C-alpha cells in the first residue's frame, strides 16, 4: 500500500511540474509577443 501512495505522490509531482512548465512557456510566449508589438 505504501508503494501505491508513493507512486501516486510521484505522479502528482510530475503532473505539477509539467503544468508549471507549460504555464511558464505560455507566459514567456505572451511576453515575447507583447514586446514584439511594443517594439513595432
Image: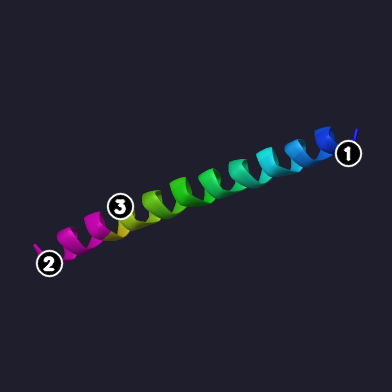
User: Circle 1 — which element?
Assistant: helix
Local secondary structure at mark 3: helix
Quadrant housing the C terminus: bottom left
The color scheme shown is: rainbow
Q: CA distance from mark 2 to mark 1?
A: 55 Å
Residue 32 in the image: x percent, y percent? 24, 58
Name the N-terminal-most of marks 2 and 1. 1
Give the label on residue 2, or none. Answer: 1
Q: Which residue is mark 3?
A: 29
Q: Nearer the viewer, residue 14 or 28?
A: 14
The structure residue drawn at horizontal position 21% and vertical position 64%, both measured from the top left corner, is 35
**Residue, disc 2:** 39
Instruction: Judge whether 11 appears above or below 27 on screen.
Output: above
Count every numbered label the image shows and give the total. 3
Q: Give above or below for 3 relative to 22.
A: above
Judged left or right of residue 10, residue 25 is left
Q: Outermost residue, front direction?
A: 3
Position of residue 38 measured from the top left corner of the image (x, y, whole percent): 17, 65
Q: Quadrant of the N terminus?
A: top right
Q: Are marks 2 and 1 in contact (CB under 8 Å)?
A: no
Which structural element holds mark 2?
A: helix
Dominant secondary structure of the magenta stretch?
helix
Q: Is 18 displayed left or right of 11 in the figure? A: left
Specify the segment rendered in magenta.
32-40
Dot 3, how many residues are within 10 Å of its Cα: few (below 14), some (14-19), or many (20+)? few
Q: Is residue 36 magenta?
A: yes
Amino acid at each position: 500500500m505504501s508503494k501505491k501512495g508513493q507512486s501516486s505522490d510521484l505522479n502528482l509531482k510530475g503532473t505539477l511540474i509539467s503544468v508549471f512548465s507549460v504555464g511558464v512557456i505560455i507566459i514567456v510566449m505572451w511576453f515575447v509577443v507583447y514586446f514584439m508589438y511594443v517594439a513595432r
